[in-house]
Amino acid sequence: MKKSIFISVFSLLATSLFAQFDGDGGTSGSKAISKDDKSIIAWANGLELSRDNTVTYGKVYDALGVADTTNLVCVSLGNRGVAIATFDRPIINGEGFDFVVFENAFDSTFMELAFVEVSSNGIDYFRFPTKTSSTEEKATQTTSHYYNLAGKYSYKYGVGFDLSELEDNALLDKNNIRFVRLIDVFGGEDKTTEGDIIWEYNELYWLGSSGFDLSGIGIINGGEKYKIADMEGILLEEDTYELVSSTNFDESITDNLKHKNYKSGNLLFKGVTVIGDGYEMAIGWGPSNVSDTSKMKATTISGFGWNNDYYVSAYMSGIDGENTGYLHGYYSSYNTEEHNTVTTTDGKEFEPLGVYVCQSLSSYIYEPATPQADLYFKIVAEGFDSEGKSTGKQEVYLRDGSDTTIGNRADWRYMNLAQLGKVQKIQFSVESNDATYYIPTYMCIDNLTYKQSIDSDLENISEKDITAKINIYPNPSCGDVTIENVTNTNIRIFDIQGRIIYNKKSSDNTVAISNLPSGTYFVSIISNENVVTKKLIIK
């Protein structure tokens, strides 16, 4: 009897140990998600890529927007390469899968995998638990051998990830995921959460490959959209800035100031050009298009024969892809006029989240031909509140002392600005220790992402919404609340920092909030394209 029980237990353990996970898309029981799935509400709109120079397939923008299903449009990470994606809204912990990752595997046995991690602050990342049911080096690896590894399905399908699988941590806000990080799995060496070696497609492990090929990341459960100051208008709206060129600038006037301001949404990118002694002292934000010069309204002259933005045009593109715009600026500490700043058009405070930055060819071409380990070049952003006091600084090194090679400075890097808090102004500058080659302090930025305060949003609500016959009671409340005159609406509750803590579609007018701590909240009710926001006090 005891022997029989032992055999039964052993059989159960063996079955558990070698359990198969779900198969490829289209097979029975598969959890694969098609890129056309209607549950996907948004896609990654920014990507920072870190890979060695032996892998060159694809550009970062090949992994932005809707995933491609031809298995040709993607960006390769290379061995242990890293990609960090950003979005136009936070990912939140809802029902089922919260986001989905797509790779371009040719079939269910051609595996190039990646670990998936998330972060709400851009500093602390948390990895999804991973498993494998095949530890045999020579075994033919298939979709059903993997769990929570991106790339396990063939190219028409993506792997879904559920935030509820991550352990609770004070450093992770599951209702405010701003970053998804992918790290290429090196087959035969990297291990699962349980300590088992991960074997990818066997021949690829021995012959080498371009690693995980990212084709898209989709959001399934998302929060309120951020505001994004993109630069596409600079190619379309000639009146949004004053061009400085050889045709509209008089070099004989040494105190001639030419402002170059650009407006995107309710943000104003302010700059000023000061010319003295026949050369440029400082230039503000200017239009920098890429290869399609037919979209250029005019060309910015930056230093009269010293540098021209057409060099930039042949060198790089905006974060959004080919022929997209970005802002190109030059910083000079000698200029007394304020330049390269960002403010709101009404002068009110806003909450910056991040911006993509890179070094311009205007500075790149002046770097020494022989690499110097001690040479650094960084972009700095400093925030200022409504009283003019600094709220802090953030910086991104585009070259640092550990970088002994001259790489591609056109790669966009993400500068996390959330630590600046609420600001009335951001000042961008460049710092370098170069004293030999006099590398010009040019920089480029694109897609500045930000939030307005809840108070600002309340002021923008239309009069029709304000007078709507919608009421919340009891208010203040010690438990559940009732919302009058609403049916089939989307109800979202924000805390005082603007974070979404409740987001559900409801046909009922009762909202269960007894688990929320005491404090001030804002309830946003979305119905038939009308938005009503009410303040709620919980005792």
Image: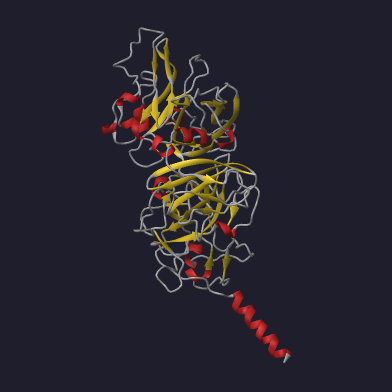
Compared to residue 285, the image places residue 42 above or below, namely below
User: Which quadrant is home to the C terminus?
Assistant: top right
Q: Is residue 405 above or below residue 142?
A: above
Protein image colouring = secondary structure
Image: 293 above or below 468: above
Judge from the rendering whether residue 483 lies leftward or rightward of residue 527; answer left or right: right
Residue 253 % position (x, y): 37, 7
Can residue 411 be seen here? Answer: no
Query: In the displayed image of the protein, which residue is found farthest to the bottom?
Result: 1
Total residue callouts: 0
Which residue of the protein is positioned furthest toward the right in this rendering?
2
Q: Position of residue 27 (x, y in %)?
A: 42, 72
The answer, for residue 444, to whether it is visible in the render is: yes
Is residue 440 or residue 525 the one in the foreground?
525
Q: Is residue 273 above or below residue 37?
A: above
Residue 1, image x, y percentages: 72, 92
Q: Quadrant of residue 191?
A: bottom right
Q: Could you tell whether 288 is left or right of 374 in the image? A: left
Residue 306 in picture, x, y percent from top left: 39, 20
Front residue (pair 514, 349): 514
Between 332 and 423, the one lying in front of the other is 423
Residue at image position (60%, 76%) is: 16
Q: Quadrant of residue 281?
A: top left
